[in-house]
Amino acid sequence: MEDLEKAILISFDESGRVESALKLQAVGFIDKIKESPLICSICVERLCFSKLVQVQFWCLQCLHDVIRVRYSSMSLDEKGFVRKSVFSMACFERLEGVDDESSVRVLEGPPFIKNKLAQVLVTLIYFEYPLIWSSVFVDYLPHLGKGAPVIDMFCRILNALDDELISLDYTRTQDELVVATRVKDAMRQQCVAQIVRAWYNIVSLYRNSDPDLCSSVLDSMRRYISWIDIGLIVNDAFIPLLFELILVKGLPEQLRGSAAGCVLAVVSKRMDLQAKLSLLQNLKISRVFGLVAEDSDSELASKIASLLTGYATELLECSKKLNSEDLKQTSMELLDEVLPSVFFVTQNCEVDNAFSIVQFLLGFVATMKSLSPLTEKQLLHVGQILEVIRTQICYDPIYRNNLDVLDKIGREEEGRMVEFRKDFFVLLRSVGRVAPDVTQMFIRNSLGNAVASSSDRNVEEVEAALSLFYAFGESINDEVNDQYLHLVLAAFLDERGIHHPNINVSRRASYLFMRVVKSLKAKLVPFIENILQNLQDTVAQFTRMNSMSKELSGSEDGSHIFEAIGLLIGMEDVPPEKQSEYLSSLLTPLCQQVKVELAVMESALVYLPLGIPCPPSLPTFILLIAAALIQVEVLLINAKVQNAEDPVAKIANIQQIIMAINALSKGFSERLVTASRPAIGLMFKQTLDVLLQILVVFPKIEPLRTKVTSFIHRMVDTLGASVFPYLPKALEQLLAESEVQNILLELIFESFSYFGSR
């Protein structure tokens, strides 16, 4: 046996000091012992004498595995021996023939050993109760008089039975469900009433002397309330005891919270709704309302918060499903009574499950959808729900610095809040549909109050108010307020948006403006001239040399403004003459802008490469495509002539220009540029001609090759079959100078797929 214990200790070693070969040898040795026909006797004997917790755990695990896997092949004597031995250990008794002085009691071991013993006993119950071992619970109850060790073990057995077999929180096989039903039916018939009586007596006796033990008893009891006879708990003895435990201030919070958990289990128990309403009335839950205000950060407050939310949820179900108007009215009166406390705990307490609160509030708001107009009390509830939403979506100021620099902690908190907020924004949209005026006024006031609040708080409050505004705006039907389009455009186009001095704000506004254009573009046709006029300097700044910010890239790199413009001028609603004018005739102003701001080119260089006539009178907007082409041409010429002066800046600017053209082209459909308005297609072909020269001048600059390849992708979609003559030249240059990469392979496959289908 000493060899077995040594082998077990070696196999459990995590210090790294044991050689791997020796550890493998030890594992092989104990695995061989497991296969012994005497393994049950060996394990029981070691459990009686070994004080090493590793050995105790290994022996209990062996017994568990043997019963679970080999039960059907065990002899009757072996089953009886294991049953008697395990039960005696759980009852704090010594086995027959074991010397009292030298023996060890498992119940004196650490919690994880007692939990493993409970698991072994529950495995026996799985196979033997009630057909073989019908008296297991009845036989155990008298041993509870031995005091705390046995009572604690009984709680662990009941918890293990719930975890391993009964609870529906875990996925069960069909066989397990059958066994669970058999066990519950037998317990209901045989011993549940006695167990409940034992719970009551233990809590009454030990509430002052051993409150932790009472908490364990109540936590076990809470698990069983859902399927035992509710009358065993809801009576003149147990309910007063539970509320007394909750309300007495001198008792430990853990005990009071456990009692609240039991009341929540009573409230949540499935039953006939009329009986449920009567139960909820008789609980007189209002007596616990004041507890949440005493210490909102306490564990007890969290438990009371869950109780009140569960109570309100059940009342809401009664109000929706009961047929009697009187009963509905009673449900709503009780609900009105508890709602202020629910709103308070949601804003001020740590609630175990925020999702359940949101679901309750969504259900509550849904009951108002058919009511018009809302009563004064209902409007008050709407305002309180909005305040709950605002409070819940606020960032904790403790993360302000992390979020400001967006370090690892900041990114994690941002990700957590993005996910956490989703349900609350769903609730916001639901409230907005029921009471739009109240919602708009609340958001307006939130913005005003946030800006006016103290500097140590207003960052989070302003962000929350803006998030509310944004989320609510996303849900509003775009057909409702067309008369305000000019105001929206003004906000986007002036210093509040795209022209904001902070480039981060400006680029974010550009992205949001693109989204607005994408959803409302048909309604923006009358505003195109004004929009283009206001964006003139922004476009020039984006495509100006050295304008690229190294800090801004990805989804908010500024190219969205070109996508927005492309969506606007690429519509068939725009007259052909105007569309052609926007894309082909405004060359001189752009040339002048390039000369003044960059002093890089001369007029001859500007107009000659394109061969586009310059009309005598031009609108004030910059020709987007032509501007980009001119700058590419000039940059290419300068790249050749000026001996690659400042090549990094030139490459960066060419990248900017390609991005702008690529984004701009997204607004033009193949049908428009090839069939209905081929002049537009011609402009894109000229653009493609110029951009392909980049591959000649900068054959080995991967960022440029990637950008050009991406643009060719776009042109395959935009120009259709008319792009085919350009592909051999493009592919030849791309394949000649670098390894075949994914984006190039995609282009080749896309071309084959596109033209092969035609």
Image (cartoon, rainbow, N blue to C red):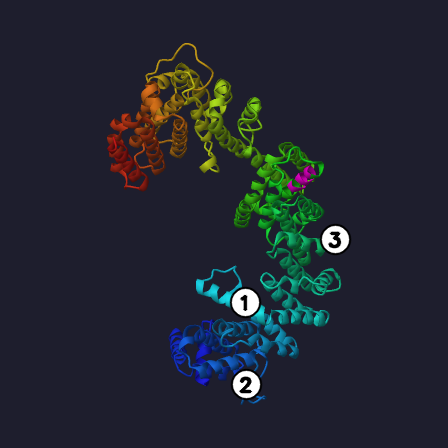
Examine the rendering and report whether any part of residue 382 can be seen: yes
**Residue displayed at 62% across by 71% down:** 195
User: Of callouts 1 and 2, which one flags the residue occurring earlier in the amino acid sequence?
Assistant: 2
Q: Residue at x 62, y 65 (%)?
A: 221
Q: Residues within 10 Å of mark 1 (few under 14, many from 20)?
A: some
Q: Is residue 504 left or right of residue 440?
A: left
Spatial separation of the CA atoms under disc 3 and disc 1: 40 Å
Q: Earlier in the sequence, mark 3 or mark 2?
A: 2
- Please, what is the three-letter code of the amino acid marked with disc 2? Leu
- In the image, 69 versus 565, the foreground residue is 69
Q: Residue tagged by mark 2?
A: 95
Q: Amino acid at mark 3?
A: Gly
Q: In the rendered structure, are the residues bearing label 1 and label 2 in contact, judged by CB atoms less than 8 Å apart?
A: no
Q: Which residue is mark 3?
A: 290
Magenta stretch, main secondary structure, is helix
Callout 1, which amino acid? Asp
Q: Quadrant of residue 33?
A: bottom left
Q: Could you say whether the residue bearing mark 2 is in a helix, strand or loop? A: loop
Residue 185 numbered tag:
1
**Can residue 161 be seen at all in this image of the molecule?**
no
Front residue of this view, candidates 97 and 114: 97
Q: CA distance from mark 1 to mark 2?
A: 32 Å
